[in-house]
Image (cartoon, rainbow, N blue to C red):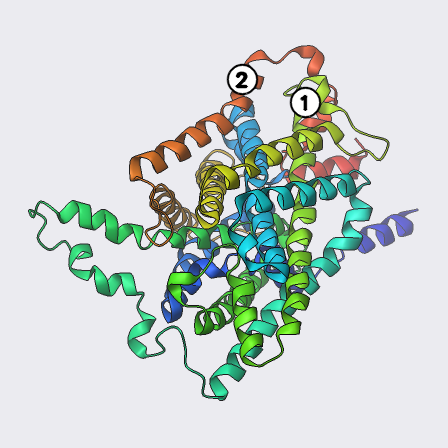
Amino acid sequence: MATADNTKNTKARTYISWLTIAFMMVAAVASIRSLPAMAVYGLGSIMLFLIPAIVFFVPVALVASELGTGWNGGIYGWVKQAYGDRLGFFVIWFLWIEVVVWYPSVLGFAASTLAYMFNPKLADNGIFTCIVIIVFYWASTLLAMKGFDTISKFTKWFMLLGTALPAACLVILGIIWLIMGNPSAAPMNWGALIPSVFHEHSHVLAGAHRLHPDYWKEFVGSIAGLVLIVSNFLAYAGIEMNAIHARELKNPEREMPKAILLAGIMIVLIFIPPTLAISLVVPADSTSLTAGVIQAYAAFFDAFHIAWVTPILGALLIIGALGGVLSWTAGPSKGLLFVGKSGMFPPILQKVNKNGVQQNILILQAILVTLLSTVYIFIDNVSDAFWMLSAMAALMYLTIYVFMFMSAMKLRKTQPNVKRGFVLKGLHFWCILGLAATILAIIFGLIPPSQFSNMPVLEYIGILVAGLIITGAPPFIFYAVRKPSWEVAPKSETEAYSAPLQDLQNSDTTGN
């Protein structure tokens, strides 16, 4: 029996390579739908991609690696261990509602791409965009109702065909464009590596003439020119989902930094070259936030006299958008269901169908997405509506990261004896760097971008703040009115969802 037990334990200690984790991180983060926002900067976009990679992506990945190899439950588990049930519930709720807000933006990208395949004028039509989002999302919801196995069969190919292939095509087209000697719509000189807003407002950003009556007005205007960088923070978000796999490495302390470095390089390469390709053929003043990628394809293929290829790439982009939606439709809502069963949700929101899928949460999710998609109707400019939703989603996700960094520092102090599979050297430095970058990005996110919005600053801030309050209030209300009858899952099961991993392993070993 001892031999059999030893064999079993040996098989359980199967390691994965750091290359595997690197590719998993890339798959979770990389997407080309956010690239048009940076294409308006041309070569300057390189700096605006690298800054968030260094001050945000790397700290998030490193800190999440320590937390993910110490405690179960992802961000929910980490915050619950550090700050208790109430804030843990808030974080899992905010993660879920952030994804709900994100759906209309990614499907707005799909709607504009679809429009370019048939009638480009429809790309600026809010009613068309709204209808397409509703149809696509309800179709995704019905598919998600069939269970994870069904979704997984689609998402792998959707992401490969809809993200990797279109990105590679953009880069190849851009190289061919330059080799053929075609002019670039964006400046391609060394000076262009510094974003134009720094040139235009360098004296303001340096603090010159602070006593001048127009100084602070111009200062806000100069900052507004850089606000689109906030979309880059959201573009790098999600890396923490795969950081938990660090404990499956043979030597996490040595291999995890290598995986993060490689993933960071690969993600930046997926972001930057396609962005530059877009800037080659689409002028900054006519770049659509939702349709910028398909605009670039149309410009390339029209110039090469093969316009018939544009709809094909458009179809691939739509497939990629749907793959992203499918991959996120069931995940956060499943975590929300699990926490809800601990007594946080009324029974109606805990109902599952015959496939074990949280059907009522998914239906609520679809209803909220339907309501949010009407933003495209009420805001005249589709790009402005897209940015508003993207900014809201970014602010929500960034708020979650604030709690993550704070939890990491607190748990290092309050639970130092919990065994971590990966122990981050200089944890407080990385947390403070990540916190500073995150808070600065939140401040930037409350300023309307000068490139795309004519909305007054106070009105814009008011809408975003009101949105954050409205979406963030429900978990505190549910927590305040919760009843013992709402608790469906055994307490031991819900506690295990955020317990230290060493406790779970000991429990498995002893058979308890």
Q: Nearer the viewer, residue 193 or 25?
A: 193
Mark number displayed over residue 354: none
Tell me which numbered mark, 2 or 1, is placed earlier along the sequence: 1
- The quarter holding residue 45 reads bottom left
Between 32 and 375, the residue placed more toward the observer is 375
Residue nearer the viewer, 341 or 59: 341
Of discs 2 and 1, which sits in the foreground?
A: 2
Assign a secondary structure to mark 2.
Answer: helix
One can see residue 420 in this view: no
Position of 301 relative to 163 (above/below): below
The residue sitting at 80% across, 41% down in the picture is: 147
* Residue under label 1: 342
Question: Callout 1, which amino acid?
Answer: Ser
* Residue 112 visible to an observer of this rendering: yes
**Amino acid type shown at disc 2:** Ile
Q: Give the quadrant of residue 137.
A: top right
